[in-house]
Image: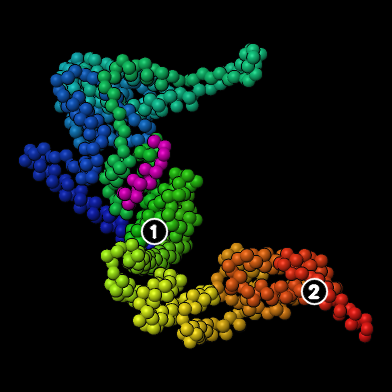
Amino acid sequence: MTNKEKYCKYIKNIKRFFRYCIDDCLKRIYHFILFLFCIEPKKEENKSHELLKLEENSDIKNLKENLNRYLKDSSSKGFVISIKGNWGVGKTFFWNIYAKENLDEKKYVYISLFGINKLDEIKTKILNKISKQANIVNKTKGFFGSSRIVGVDIGAVISIFGIKNFKYIVVCFDDFERLSPNLNISEVLGVISELKEQYNCKIVIINNNDQLEELDRLNSSSKFTISPDTLGNDTKKQECFYSNSNNHGIFEKYIEKIVDLELLYKPTVEYQVNLLLNSFNEKEFIDRELMKKLFGKIKNLNKETNLRLMQKYIFTLKLFREFLEEKEIENFKEIKDELQTKIFVYIFGKNKLNNLIRYYNLNDEYIEEIIEKNLVNIPGDIKVKFNKDIKSARENIKRREEDNKKYEISQQIQKENEDYKKKIEDTYLRYISDLDYDKDTFIKEFYELLNGKENIIEFTYFNRFTFFIKDCLIVLDKTKEDEFKKFYIEKAKKYFDTRYKNMERYFFQQAYFLDEESRNELIDYYNDLIKGDIEVEKQEIYKLDIFDTMAKVIKQESNNTEERMLDNISKQEHKRRLEKDDSPYFKTTFELMEFLKDSHKLKNLENFYKTTLEIYKDLYKDKDYKYRDKIRLILKYFGIDTKELDDVVEEKEEGSNDK
């Protein structure tokens, strides 16, 4: 960490400290004023409007209403409520918030069984808590010589001070799954029963019985093995186990007898995310909606709403807080989303959740290194790399956004052209199907439509446009034939301006209805456009990889420029490659010739096709050519009779013999 970074961090901590001091001081002054005027402070409402709305439309509302109904009713006798739910779903978290908002602190005790080794410790916790809140601290001090009650039976205390001080107390028992091996669960449940039956206490049990069963399984060990001989027909060994504890069985047996009401805590993902983030003071950098979406993608119900896993995700996000709060990222939601999604995927399973990542702008390596090493203070070298990665990602996004805009514009133009094309076709179809649509009106409206777009041939296509002029307008109105032809030439030139490189030669065959002078005008215009390109192509032909280009044509991956260049290759170079023992080149040439034999592509590669056949003939005429027998069969395959060629070879031989 550089000195500048240390200084900035130091200043941040000082600001945070003073902010905390000021907040704390103001709270204390506020509570002191309330105390002076004997005003009971209102409980803080720490809920977002969204959380309250979610409660209204979920089972949480019903759960709270049931708790209020029984726990706030002073007329009812003692009873036991069991709150069940998946492990890790946040039953304790929910209960603590509920108790803080709804229960009188003077009449409420929370007992965590974690770390308790003796039953007396439970009783002592209850008695100490209630004795303080029931205004009997001085009495206990005078009677026992101390304000703390240790090792004293509940019944003894109640007999001294009276049952009214202990009536309707709410006691919550939690962490049964963390019960010490030194403590018998049946005794704990006996205390709960005693509090309920004898002292009218209201008991809430946070029920994690599933975890008790798992704990019993982990405490089990192998006792003995049954051999195959003992089992008779069974050929496999069977291992028998005994458990060092049976807390699950005991809990199930007792709970049926003492529990009066069983409530289920089953929150939604939305509720859990809002509940958790509301409890964090600094969570602005976390995208709530994205977090809901990500956890909603987990198929395992035990994990989908697991508060512990959500906390783990938030704590991991905090490692990247410095980056998530930077303006450089804030302005690029896509980067923030990707970073938070990749962290989620890393924690909860790469193989299963990779499809959540839409784009790959950020390098996983830096993210994983920060998580694996739990780098609260990210070293300068990693920070520099990560910032560089973010900058690169930002540029990629900008580039992609520009491309998307261009694509959207092109799609819009395409749609407009398609609509315009449809309008032209509909007008034409209307004329041929609607008897009330007269010829003069049609010619006027149709001609205006064709003349309404500068690049009309781009989306009506060349032959269709030709048909509209030649077979439609000219036939219907001979008096305007010259005007229509002139219009046709004008639009054709506009089309050539942008499409001449990709035009097929047979396009000019469409214009046979024009007189020779008009046709020549179009051909000359086209030749002038490609003249400059031909000069460049002649230079490029020498660089052309003939083998790769032939393979492209076969795969139909070539463009018109490549085909034109291949069509003009040097016969000498092509022959030299075929004469050599170059098997791939020889084979690819044959495959291309076979492809061109019955393909529309022959129009673009006529010269290549004829040149190659001439080379085959020349090779066959050479009696010393190593593969002459193959050439003979190739020529026959392409319909060329070799008899005439044989006669030529014989004449040459006779002539050389005479000499």
Q: Which residue is mark 1?
A: 335
**Could you tell me which residue is drawn at 32 percent across and 24 percent down?**
121
The amino acid marked with disc number 1 is Ile
Q: Which residues are magenta?
A: 286-301
For image coordinates 15% across by 23% down, the residue present is 74
Q: Secondary structure at mark 1?
A: helix
**Magenta-colored stretch includes residue 218:** no
Question: Which is nearer the N-term, disc 1 or disc 2?
Answer: 1
On the image, numbered disc 2 is attached to which residue?
644
Q: Residue at x 40, y 69 (%)?
A: 459
Give the label, 1 or 2, closer to the camera.
2
Camera-side residue of 71 and 548: 548
Q: Which picture quadrant has residue 251?
A: top left
Q: Position of residue 164 (x, y in %)?
A: 15, 19
Q: Identity of the amino acid at label 2? A: Glu
Main secondary structure found in the magenta portion: helix
Q: Is residue 158 left or right of residue 391?
A: left
Decide: few, some or many residues near mark 2? Use Cα within 10 Å; few <14, some 14-19, many ≥20: few
Comparing 1 with 264, the one in front is 264
48 lies left or right of 350: left
> Relative to 97, does residue 615 appear above or below in the rendering?
below
Q: Nearer the viewer, residue 147 or 547?
A: 547
- Between 580 and 515, the one lying in front of the other is 515
- Can residue 88 be seen from the camera position used here? yes
Q: Are marks 1 and 2 in contact (CB under 8 Å)?
A: no
Cα separation between marks 1 and 2? 74 Å
How far from the left and from the top, in percent, is residue 279?
27, 44
Residue shown at the point (47%, 78%) measured from the top left: 513
